[in-house]
Structure formats: structure tokens, C-alpha cells
Image (cartoon, helix red, strand yellow):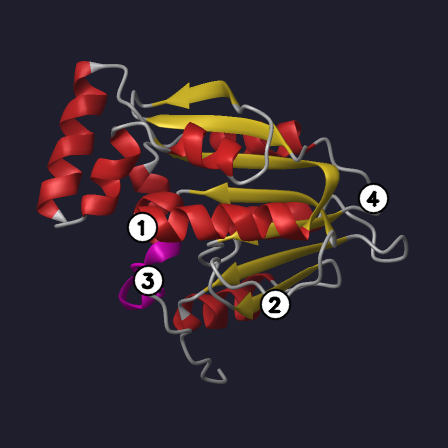
Amino acid sequence: MMKIDSIPTRGRTLDHAAFIYDFCEPILLLGKQAEYDLKILGLLELKPADKVLDLGCGTGVLCRMIGDRLSSSAGGLAVGIDAAGKMIQVARKKRESPTCRFEAMAAEKLTFSDQYFDAVVSSLFFHHVQIDLKSRALSEACRVLKPGGKLVIADMHIPTTWMGALVSHVSRWFFVQPQIGENIRGVLPGLIESAGFASPQIVARYFGYIAVFLATKK
């Protein structure tokens, strides 16, 4: 497998977990990964020719599911980006296809042209980066989206159950990750709107601490 260098970023990357990530993620999602991913896919309302960007794609499970619903002959393409080079290595080996490709790239510094994508999606990425990088990544997402394009984010948010609060706060302190603290204080909706999107809707919740946001570029 060709080595891919990680991209310098002040956000937290998961290079160390790349080769066990596919085993761990379904456990962390308590067996609900399929339901969770299908909810995100449904919100995208994909057309065969769509171009979709996946921010913080990890090993590319969701990105490949998106790509499988697109048509290469129509120009459809799902692109997954992650700053962790080892994640991209695994994603390319296991999930690259004619409608799905992966690039090592930081979400706060995208190299794509303006208004290139029809939709941007992100799953469990934003709680790994501090608030200024959250803001910059969302502004970049808005820049590369076409007017009216969709943004779908699934991530940690204000807990809605005691168990959700317990998991959120323990995670924040156990992993020494103040970025989680920002999410569970509820910063994401305001940051999404400030980046150039219409006010986001919460369209689903999972486990008492994950919210799925849907917004469109103004």
C-alpha cells in the first residue's frame, strides 16, 4: 500500500486508529450504523450526476455508499477528504471506485474550485476540531457548494438524555478533547449559519448526543 502523508492541521486526526476504525465504528454506533448512514443518504436526495464532498471521511464507508448511488457516465462523483494519511490509504484500498475517490486534505483548506459540489456531508468529524477550524471548515464547505446545495452534518450536540450527557462529558474529559465540549455546548448551528447557510434544522437524533443537521447554501 502506497504511503500517503498526513496533512498538517491543528485539528485532531486519527492516523493511529486507521487500521482498526472499521471494526470500532459499528461498536461505537451501537449497531445502528446502517440506520444512521441510510438516514444521511436519504437527506442528500442524490441524483446520478451529483458531486458530493465528504468532510473527514475516515476509511470511506459513507463516501462509498454515496458513490454507489451515482453514475460515472453522468459525471457523478463522491470525494472523501481526511487530513489523516493512513485513513486515506485504507479508504483507497478498500473503497475507491469509478464514482468514489479519496484525497488527503484538511477540511479548513480545501483545494476544490468554487461551487463545484452539489452537496457536502460530514459524519462525526466536527467534534475533533477546535472552534476556529470548525468555522473555517464550514466556510470552505459553503464556498465549494453550488447555490442551494445541501449540507448534512451528523455530530455531537447538546445532550438530550442523561445517558447522552454522561457519554458526552466522560468523552470530553477522558480523551482530553475540549473540542467535544464546544459541540455539546451547542455551537454548531450558529457556526453553520455564520458560514453562509440558511438556519439548519435538526432532522434526527441518535443516542441522546448526536444530532443530524440539514442546511442549504443561501
Q: Nearer the viewer, mark 2 or mark 1?
A: 2
| Region rendered in magenta | 11-22
Up the image or down, 9 lies above or below 138; here it is: below
Question: Do the residues under discs 2 and 3 have CB atoms within 8 angstroms?
Answer: no
Q: Is residue 125 visible?
A: no
Q: Nearer the viewer, mark 1 or mark 4?
A: 1
SS state under label 3: loop
Total numbered labels placed on residues in the image: 4
Q: Nearer the viewer, mark 3 or mark 4?
A: 3
Classed neighbour count for the residue bearing mark 4: other residues with Cα under 10 Å, few (<14), some (14–19), many (≥20): some
Left/right of residue 84 with respect to residue 201 in the rendered view: left
- Name the residue carrying label 1: 128
Query: Residue type at mark 3?
Result: Thr
Classed neighbour count for the residue bearing mark 1: other residues with Cα under 10 Å, few (<14), some (14–19), many (≥20): many
Any magenta on residue 7? no
- Name the residue carrying label 4: 48
- Distance between mark 3 and mark 1 Cα atoms: 7 Å
Nearest to the observer: residue 29 or residue 79: 79
